[in-house]
């Protein structure tokens, strides 16, 4: 047993987190900044932070992840990191020549009280930022929130520091992406195009973290939301925020700053959430939903009805990030399955509230988020009430193997499979992919474990 | 070593590598880029700060302490005191394999423990939460040992992990709790963390159990972390040769082995950079000499085994070692004979670690490949130039912050394993006791040695030399491959291995053959791109009549 020391009996813990279902803010900020064209993320802290974040993102995407660091030493930690950041800005513009440097803080720079706004202003005053170039920032202390919070903070920083209101409304809608894969962002753009709606999607990591092999390394790949687009979001008709935790804060900021009204919808994972997304977008743009999209939906429903017997009553444990878990749990219920154990390390009352609503039909469901809502607890719950399926990031494979539970990789990080960056989880197409995976997991198990006389040809 | 022929002028290459930097940066980087001369071994600026803003391969002190040195020991509960990320990123990512004695024996490597420090802990102090976490770990697991690792905020807010550890250790009585001040900002790279880890392991673990293990030739294997099963292969060879491994620091190890390690009669060191401190301290306190070995490469493995046999100076052992080599080498030769015609004459670059960029050159030599440029990520001058430069290394402010333990001979346990005369005699025979000659001696004249290579320099080097393979880590993997050059990861081995010993050598030969000769690299361009753009080319097909 790989997790042989995990006891069945659950005891409350206050000090110790074991096998976390979250990581820290800066990696989310780094990921968000990669979704801006010509942007180099910069980690204002020790070298290790930047190295760890780049490594984790690289393992997840199997793609180059470029980012720089302020390389704090003990001296900088005592005297403040201003000199390090100023030197970083100078070095980066002369060596790597980005259009934008997106600086995020770390627990180290936050603890010593470095003020990114003041330092970037000084850089600007000192003439260290070349004409037409930008240095933006987000405060992302690792001891607050989670990687999802860091993502939200950087997206908010992007909105606040680029958006301009000219007073002249543009016929376009902002879609603020919650933490989703490049494949998902590509799918959002495709759906919007099908609907005939002009959108500005930000951030957008498609064509950045799924870049083609060409024999040439593009330091700044062709993807990412452009500066021009980001400036224009202040003139958009409205914003649609995909996810109340990772996307809504940026929408609120944009509303405050440029009076762009917004609506928050769930990330379009599964049937119902995709329906709401399509409804909201078509309504906001004043367009009818074309038959192509209705047909896509129909194909999803078709598979749901065809294969309903395999879903019914199946118990599921899941872990990950709130903006994904909320619509995913709802989708499992649409499939007539029983999500019974759910944890997310990301704190926030919104998750609890939404889960309570969604899970009304399953009174026995356990769910917890925030402090000590970790995979150790989830595993213990599974030992007390076993499930038919586990859904979560790669770390779930240790539980899945010990408990002989079918397992689907979903979320961040996925370190041992490919596909997540190429095939979407969002929209009707993404939901179909999820169903295919769920059925595959169940059926592979049935094929592996069925007695010979019960081995089925047709399923 | 012969001279590099038919390669670009290294002096011009160096100019090009630093050409784009601001003047001050260029000046600094030039000192870390050296044209090799294996005889004179010119000074390489190493173990100095990376310029802020430069995209570096380096990580932090915590990574070196927890991730590298302490991570592989399976029965310590390693609690990271800090915000969640540090523990999360070091969770199982280094591929330290371990094989518990039975399915019931302790193994915490699959677990990730953290105090998940929150803002209130940063403001009001985190010691209370730390002690609570230690108590909960003890209640849940009753481990033999709990280690505490400090992350950046811990040092800044002044949490005393050592006092907290001591208090809990005394409270429990049957669990060794100890702490490490390995905050990420200490030193200039992972290297500081190695040193801090060595100090802590030496202070808190080594020497706690004086039981003498059975076996005639007892040794410890230092600086071998069992990535991809490397230590398993070395263990196999040791067993075959009749050598008794007391402890490995720290691949596939237990706390019990480390506690007992001072009873060995020889320390052999694989990764000089990360563990030489331990060799030195054990020599001073217990009288155990150390010797640099290299089990990466079949010839190097044979050489290292012979050195060990020579050290123990026992005819039976020497004969047994020869028998092992005679049995293993033909299998290796069969593989190399098949592969070498396909790899001969190709070129490699290695920018990785603190010893791997040296060790793996042996394997490339066995493949008939030339290392045109190499450098370490976090090594010191002695790893490049040899330990003779140690007295001349200036201790700068960053190194001064790392504690140097004052070690003296143990009044009871100090027992020189060899007399001065015996050691001298061994040295006469060419046995390098307590020494290491570094990477440069082995590299060709006029090859390039680059310390802490930056992303920019790596790309330039690839453009200029067009190597057949580039060796580095995960952050560089796909950047280099996007340039059409295969990258072999020498931290994680691209999830393969082992690469040590005889079996490991053949694994490596096959992997490199596969990588440098993979037809996929020739498929990158689409047919229409090769012929110019499809739109602009004339239709060439002709109408075929029957």
Image (cartoon, rainbow, N blue to C red):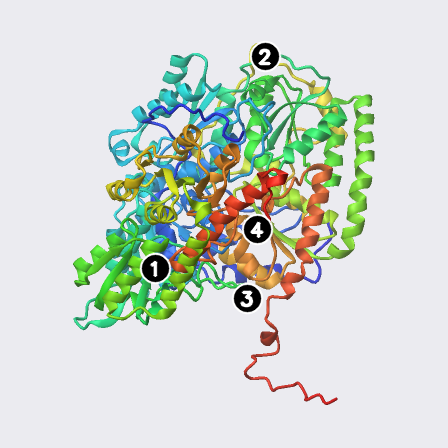
Name which residue lies at 68% across and 88% down: B542
Q: Are marks 3 and 2 on the same chain?
A: no
Q: Is residue A244 left or right of residue B227?
A: left
Residue B385 in the image, given as x and y percentages of width and height: 61, 42
B364 lies above or below A292: above
The residue to which callout 2 is attached is: B210
Which marked residue is nearer to the observer: mark 3 or mark 2?
3
Q: Residues within 10 Å of mark 3 (few under 14, many from 20)?
A: some
Q: Is residue A182 visible?
A: no
Q: Is residue B331 left or right of residue B39?
A: right
Q: Residues within 10 Å of mark 2 (few under 14, many from 20)?
A: few
Q: Nearer the viewer, residue A191 or A65?
A: A191
Q: CA distance from mark 2 to mark 1?
A: 60 Å
A76 lies above or below B485: above
Q: Earlier in the sequence, mark 4 or mark 3?
A: 3
**Numbered disc 4: secondary structure:** loop
Marking on residue A203: 1
**Numbered disc 3: secondary structure:** loop
The residue to which callout 3 is attached is: A214
The residue to which callout 4 is attached is: A458
**Numbered disc 1: secondary structure:** loop
Q: CA distance from mark 4 to mark 2?
A: 66 Å
Q: Which residue extends farthest front?
A: A453
A199 lies above or below B41: below
Q: CA distance from mark 3 to mark 1?
A: 24 Å
Label 4 marks a residue whose chain is A
Identify the image quadrant of residue A250: bottom left
Q: CA distance from mark 4 to mark 3?
A: 43 Å
Q: Residues within 10 Å of mark 4 (few under 14, many from 20)?
A: few
């Amino acid at each position: 047993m790989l997790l042989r020391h995990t006891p069945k009996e659950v005891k409350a813990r206050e000090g110790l987190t074991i096998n976390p279902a979250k990581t820290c803010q800066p990696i989310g900020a780094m990921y968000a900044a990669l979704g801006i064209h010509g942007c180099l993320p910069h980690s204002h802290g020790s070298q290790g932070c930047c190295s760890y974040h780049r490594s984790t993102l690289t393992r997840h995407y199997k793609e180059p992840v470029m980012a720089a660091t302020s390389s704090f030493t003990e001296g900088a930690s005592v005297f403040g990191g201003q000199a390090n950041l100023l030197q970083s800005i100078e070095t980066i513009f002369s060596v790597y020549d980005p259009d934008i440097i997106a600086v995020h803080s770390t627990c180290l720079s936050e603890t010593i009280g470095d003020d990114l706004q003041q330092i970037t202003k000084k850089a600007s005053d000192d003439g260290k930022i070349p004409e037409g170039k930008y240095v933006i920032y987000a405060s992302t202390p690792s001891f607050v929130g989670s990687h999802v919070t860091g993502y939200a903070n950087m997206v908010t920083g992007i909105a606040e520091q680029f958006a301009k209101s000219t007073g002249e409304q543009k016929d376009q809608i902002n879609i603020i992406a919650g933490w989703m894969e490049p494949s998902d962002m590509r799918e959002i753009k495709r759906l919007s195009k099908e609907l005939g709606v002009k959108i500005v999607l930000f951030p957008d990591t498609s064509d950045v973290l799924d870049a083609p092999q060409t024999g040439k390394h593009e330091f700044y790949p062709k993807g990412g939301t452009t500066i021009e687009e980001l400036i224009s979001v202040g003139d958009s008709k409205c914003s649609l925020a995909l996810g109340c935790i990772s996307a809504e804060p940026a929408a609120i900021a944009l509303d405050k700053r440029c009076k762009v009204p917004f609506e928050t919808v769930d990330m379009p994972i599964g049937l119902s959430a995709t329906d709401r997304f399509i409804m909201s977008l078509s309504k906001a743009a004043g367009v009818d939903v074309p038959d192509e999209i209705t047909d896509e939906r129909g194909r999803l429903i078709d598979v749901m009805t065809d294969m309903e017997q395999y879903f019914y009553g199946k118990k599921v444990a899941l872990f990950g990030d709130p903006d994904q878990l909320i619509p995913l749990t709802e989708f499992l219920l649409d499939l007539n399955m029983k999500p019974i154990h759910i944890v997310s390390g990301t704190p926030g009352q919104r998750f609890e509230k939404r889960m309570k609503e969604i899970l009304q039909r399953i009174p026995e469901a356990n769910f917890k988020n925030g402090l000590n809502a970790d995979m150790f607890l989830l595993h213990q719950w599974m030992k007390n009430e076993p499930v038919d399926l586990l859904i979560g990031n790669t770390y779930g494979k240790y539980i899945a193997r010990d408990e002989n539970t079918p397992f689907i990789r979903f979320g961040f990080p996925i370190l041992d499979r490919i596909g997540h960056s190429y095939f979407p989880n969002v929209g009707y197409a993404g939901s179909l992919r999820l169903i295919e995976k769920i059925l595959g997991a169940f059926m592979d198990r049935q094929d592996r474990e069925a007695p010979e006389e019960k081995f089925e040809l047709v399923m | 070593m012969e001279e590099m022929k038919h390669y670009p002028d290294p002096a011009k290459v160096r100019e090009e590598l630093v050409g784009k930097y601001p003047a001050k940066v260029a000046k600094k980087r030039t000192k870390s880029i050296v044209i090799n001369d294996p005889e004179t071994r010119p000074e390489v600026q190493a173990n100095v700060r990376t310029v802020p803003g430069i995209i570096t391969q380096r990580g932090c002190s915590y990574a070196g302490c927890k991730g590298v040195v302490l991570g592989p020991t399976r029965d310590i509960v390693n609690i990271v005191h800090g915000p969640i990320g540090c523990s999360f990123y070091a969770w199982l990512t280094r591929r330290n394999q371990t094989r518990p004695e039975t399915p019931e024996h302790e193994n915490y490597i699959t677990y990730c423990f953290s105090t998940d420090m929150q803002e209130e802990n940063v403001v009001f102090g985190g010691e209370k939460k730390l002690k609570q976490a230690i108590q909960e770990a003890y209640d849940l697991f009753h481990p033999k040992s709990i280690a505490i690792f400090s992350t950046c905020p811990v040092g800044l807010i002044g949490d005393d992990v050592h006092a907290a550890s001591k208090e809990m250790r005394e409270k429990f009585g049957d669990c060794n709790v100890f702490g490490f001040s390995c905050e990420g900002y200490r030193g200039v790279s992972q290297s500081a963390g190695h040193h801090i880890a060595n100090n802590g392991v030496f202070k808190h673990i080594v020497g706690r159990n004086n039981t003498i293990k059975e076996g005639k030739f007892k040794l410890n294997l230092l600086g071998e972390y069992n990535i991809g099963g490397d230590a398993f292969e070395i263990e196999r060879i040791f067993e075959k040769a009749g050598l008794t491994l007391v402890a490995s620091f720290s691949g596939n190890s237990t706390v019990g082995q480390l506690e007992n390690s001072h009873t060995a009669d020889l320390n052999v060191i694989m990764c000089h950079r990360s563990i030489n401190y331990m060799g030195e301290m054990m020599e001073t306190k217990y009288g155990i000499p150390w010797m640099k070995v290299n089990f990466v490469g079949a010839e190097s493995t044979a050489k290292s085994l012979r050195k060990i046999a020579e050290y123990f100076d026992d005819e039976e052992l020497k004969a047994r070692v020869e028998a092992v080599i005679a049995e293993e080498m033909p299998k290796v030769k069969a593989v190399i004979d098949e592969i070498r015609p396909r790899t001969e004459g190709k070129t490699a670059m290695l920018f990785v670690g603190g010893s791997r960029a040296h060790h793996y050159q042996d394997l490339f030599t066995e493949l008939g490949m030339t290392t045109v440029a190499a450098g370490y990520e976090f090594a010191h001058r002695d790893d490049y130039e040899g330990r003779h430069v140690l007295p001349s290394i200036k201790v700068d402010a960053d190194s001064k912050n790392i504690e140097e333990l004052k070690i003296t001979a143990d009044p009871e346990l100090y027992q020189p394993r060899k007399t001065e005369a015996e050691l001298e005699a061994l040295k006469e025979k060419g046995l390098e006791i307590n020494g290491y000659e570094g990477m440069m001696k082995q590299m060709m004249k006029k090859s390039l040695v680059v310390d802490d290579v930056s992303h920019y320099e790596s790309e330039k080097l690839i453009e200029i030399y067009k190597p057949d393979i580039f060796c580095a880590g995960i952050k560089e993997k796909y950047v280099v491959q996007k340039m059409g050059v295969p990258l072999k990861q020498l931290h994680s081995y691209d999830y393969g291995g082992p690469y040590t010993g005889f079996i490991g050598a053949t694994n490596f030969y096959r992997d490199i053959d596969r990588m440098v000769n993979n037809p996929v690299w020739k498929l990158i361009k689409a047919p229409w791109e090769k012929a110019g753009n499809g739109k602009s080319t004339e239709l060439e097909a002709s109408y075929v009549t029957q």
